[in-house]
Amino acid sequence: MIKAQNVVKTFDGHRALDGLNITVPKGAIYGLVGPNGAGKSTIIRHLAGIYRQDSGEVMIDGEKVFENPALKGRIAYIPDDLYFFLQANIRDMMRFYRGVYPNFSMERYNKLRDVFELDEKRSMRHLSKGMQKQAAFWLAMSCCPDVLILDEPVDGLDPVMRRQVWSLVMGEVTERGTTVLVSSHNLRELEDVCDHVGIIHKGKTVLEHSLSELQDNIVKVQIVYPEGGDLPENLNVLHEAQSGRVRTVIIRGTMDEVETALKASNPVFYDMIPLTLEEIFIYEMGGAAYEIKDVIL
């Protein structure tokens, strides 16, 4: 289990993390989302053991991460900005990883060679961004990590390789019980792979749920009322828009609760539509004063 509790981190007087809390169950794929500057990369670097928090706790399986070499040997981290030794090729990096990670598997490394089809003798700095990202996954997966931490992991990959990489990640979870934390702005993609989601804003956790719970507790409704009809007052309406007679309403609550209330208001027609993760993010962040603003140019 990954657990960050009341984590505070300040840079030059700015609180990048302001009492942040996240909990990632063992064997979960956890999507960490938030606007730019929310603190995603900062908390990820704490979880990878790069930063030491000013206060609070950052723990994996009950152990503190910072300055814990044995624990770090079980964590593979792929950052958004990749770093490799300047003159190294993939085989050079493989030898380095093999010396650092006690569970590094040459058998897995050799099997993944057929997946990524990269020239192992070509200098890393001469590979494209997408090829470097593939090499990073090749090396990370060969480490057989218990915890996999990914920051914008498929940025720069073509659609086929993106699907291949996600298939490998989900295979790690299914076969080895690997715990995965992934930060990405591609919410549509996260929705396909994640089973838990945390939304952070200004260094704090806005909400944290399993994806199914999150989608079960917020509903989009398209509804038409007869003249004089209106929504029940007891509904928690997050957003409302109207086109002609059709009103589109975002309501916090379960489908059963919302439907019971709507039926009692005698609409002419209504249709209940599950929200995507992207829509949930937009409306939740609207409540955190991060809504889309109308600008007149």
Image (cartoon, rainbow, N blue to C red):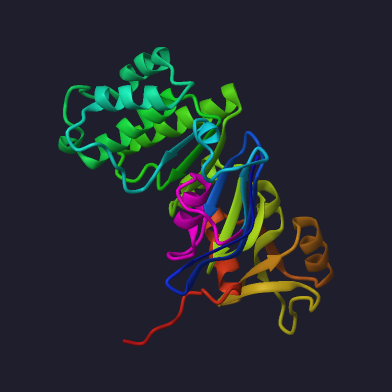
Taking the magenta stretch, the answer to whether it contains residue 43 is: yes
Q: Position of residue 258 (x, y in %)?
A: 77, 63
What residue sits 55% from the left and 62% below the top?
54
218 vs 130, left or right, is: right
Position above or below: 132 against 3: above
**Residue 255 is one of the magenta-drawn residues:** no
Residue 207, image quadrant: bottom right
Give the farthest residue toward the front.
67
Measured as percent of width and height from the top left, residue 264 is found at: 84, 69
Marks counted in the figure total: 0
Q: Position of residue 160 (x, y in %)?
A: 34, 33
The N terminus is located in which quarter?
top right
- The single residue placed furthest to the top in the displayed view is 107
Is 166 in front, or is 98? 98
Residue at image location 37% in from the left, 42% down from the top: 154
**283 or 223, which is in the foreground?**
283
Q: Is residue 18 left or right of residue 102?
A: right
Residue at 41 percent across and 32 percent down: it is 165
47 left or right of 105?
right
Q: Which residues are magenta?
A: 33-55
Does residue 86 lie above or below 294 as drawn? above
Residue 118: percent from the left, percent from the top? Answer: 24, 24
Image side of residue 90 versus residue 280, left or right: left
Quarter containing the C terminus:
bottom left
